Amino acid sequence: MKRLSRHLAAASVACAAFAAQPALAQGADGSGLSHDQTNRVVTILDTGFRTCLKVEPVYRIDCFSQVYRNGSKLLANNASYWEAEVALTRVGRNLYSFQRANTDSSKGRVRTDGYRLKAVTPASMPEAEALYATNVSRAEELLRSGNKAEQTFFGPIADEVAKFPELVP
């Protein structure tokens, strides 16, 4: 009987330790928000945005579209980041739709840092710039509009989005 009691005590300690581990990876309130996940998204966005600034402006709509979609994919499996995922997804989807509707077939694709990019027509650039600015502004607003915990974890993402408010700086 003593032997069984020791095994049960050891099992309960192991279970308690295992159950406590996910809370360490989450926000202090157990929400599923984490600095690690936020930082991964910020890094993806920052690296991608800097790559986009290296290409000709006519390729940037496609580049920024891909960067925003990559950022949103990192959040797709965490319900706590739903609003942030939606914000990034909307930007990526809207830019992609614009790029598809205004592709410049006279220019070939360019490859840079893992991206294969299509150009938009030079005539569509003023509209592209306005669309980009509007979408970035909306994304930043959505990222900053949550509760206190969301503001803590979405804030760095919003800050990164705000660093690149224009398609052509």
Image (cartoon, rainbow, N blue to C red):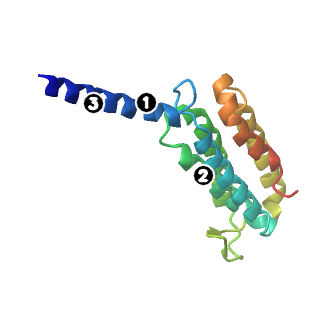
What's the amino acid at mark 1? Ala
What residue did someone put label 3 on? 10
Q: Is mark 1 on a helix, strand or loop?
A: helix
Q: Quadrant of residue 138?
A: top right
**In this view, which residue lies farthest toward the right?**
169
> At 53% across and 33% down in the image, what residue appears?
26
What residue did someone put label 2 on? 69
Q: Looking at this view, is 25 or 155 the one in front?
A: 25
x, y percentage for residue 7? Answer: 20, 30
x, y percentage for residue 86? Answer: 59, 38
Q: What element carries label 3?
A: helix
Residue 57 is left or right of residue 1, and the answer is: right
> Is residue 121 visible in the rendered structure shown here?
no
Residue 148 is left or right of residue 29, and the answer is: right
Q: Determine the CA span between mark 2 and mark 1.
A: 33 Å
**In this view, which residue lies farthest toward the left?**
1
What residue did someone put label 1 on? 20
> At 26% across and 30% down in the image, what residue appears?
11
> At 63% across and 68% down in the image, what residue appears?
115
- In the rendered view, would you say 168 is above or below 105? above
Q: Quadrant of residue 107?
A: bottom right
